[in-house]
Image (tube, rainbow, N blue to C red):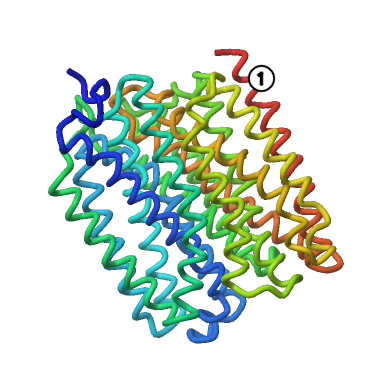
Amino acid sequence: MDAGTLDPAKSPPRTRATLPIASAATLLALMNYTAPTTVLADVARELRADIGGQTWILNGISLGLAALLLTAGSLADNYGRRRLFAIGSLVLAASSVLCAAAPTVWLFVVGRLVQGAASAALIAAGLGLVAHTYTEPAARARGTAVWSAMLGLGIALGPLVSALFGAFTHWRIFYVAVSVASVALAAGAVRWLDETRAERARRVDLPGMLTMTGAVALLVTALTLGRTGWSDPAVWVSALGALALLAAFGVIESRRPEPMLDLALLRRPAFVGATLAALVTGLSVIGLMNYFPPVLQQVTGIGPVAGALVFGIWAVTSFVVALVARRLSWSAGRQLVWGMVLAGVGELAMFGAAEAGSWSQAVPGLLVAGVASGVLNAALAGQAVATVPADRASMGSGANNTARYIGSSVGVAVVVAVVSAGRNPAHGIDLALIVSAATAFAGAVGIALLSRKN
């Protein structure tokens, strides 16, 4: 009998352990991703980081994460999802120790870069393990809903937990805790998970891996450097290098007999729609929500812990909705369309809160945006593995999440640029809300058109 058809209460212990371990890894990865937002001032003060250093503190993990997700997914399918999951856990543990002990900002940033690469392995391999274990549609919907809910919960808990560590002990202790948790994940994976891989391993597509990793790394680098000044030649050199490597990747993949990313997938409207939805989610939702809470905190004068709790209104709502979204009778395409529409409505509902200096005025919009994120996260996790061949589940996860975190990096850069162009941060964030909502509505239209072709 297939693992995906079993009653979890009656299934073998290893089958029952897959979802908790994979979900715990996603929770930890996203907590670590968002942790610096509420303690940035303390970290920057201790490490003597200037504005450029602070930018890299926030975005260093995005570089490692976005650059390695697709590669990690391909490696997991070929060489073993449990193996890559365990390796990623141990690398996350080691890089977290580096962050905890770093005496300089650049060593801390190196640690964050490596954390991003390790998180890529955990996310891509973890969702691949869930997809392999739960193959029956209802069971897979349940499994991917729980996994995707951890995205929202991790985003909520990261800033809050790091703020609490900063308030009562020291911000470095957070990274010690991440290291201990990562070792526990590795041990749990080795002890409780079965090894799974694609039925037929493909040849390592080294040229594809190198060009894609290089392209994404240069793109995120250009976006990160651009936050401190778009006239810097390094920004344009990085951007042009990214375009050149992306073009090279397309040529290489079109000629490889066994490419890392099968370009024939681009002829599948469902795959293109899921990838577009992930990209727009990063652009219009994650990018905005990475920057909106600090601005609200600045203009209202609330502290880090209170700021994290306000931020948690959106993220916890996303967590709860993702758990129950599988019960919707809508198709995945319809969930993605309405998720985008709700995201835009929620963002417009937050308009004026910062200008008024009132965090409570933002609550209705945060709740609607949280519902939207929960619907989107649940649908995206399912579509990431449903729109690719069954034995390439980790690759599908990697491709979808690569689009999400590239979109996030672009989204943050756009929000920063829009806010900086305003008369003051409050006015600027209102402009950013309009831009993000317009992007969400445009994404809804695009996904609706692609859904009609399925």
Where 141 sits versus 75, above or below? above
Q: Residue at x 49, y 33 (%)?
A: 324
Q: Residue furthest top?
A: 453
Q: Residue at x 57, y 53 (%)?
A: 409
Q: On the rendered structure, is 15 left or right of 281?
A: left
Front residue of this view, candidates 429 and 261: 429
Q: Residue at x 36, y 46 (%)?
A: 123
Q: Quadrant of residue 447?
A: top right
Task: Give the crowd class for mark 1: few <14, some 14-19, many >=20 residues within 10 Å.
Answer: some
Q: On the rendered structure, is 6 left or right of 276?
A: left
Where 182 sits versus 269, above or below? below
Where 205 sits versus 221, above or below? above
Q: Tell me the amino acid under the disc marked 1.
A: Leu
Front residue of this view, candidates 76 and 315: 315
Q: Residue at x 45, y 81 (%)?
A: 168
Q: Secondary structure at mark 1?
A: helix
Q: In the image, residue 245 lies at what x, y percent?
A: 48, 45
Q: On the rendered structure, is 190 left or right of 150?
A: left
Q: Residue furthest front?
A: 9
Q: In the image, residue 394 lies at what x, y percent?
A: 33, 36
Q: In the image, residue 325 lies at what x, y percent?
A: 52, 31
Q: Quadrant of the N terminus?
A: top left
Q: Residue furthest right?
A: 423
Report which residue position mark 1 lands on. Answer: 449
Q: Residue furthest left?
A: 191
Q: Quadrant of residue 388?
A: top left
Where 209 sits versus 50, above or below? above
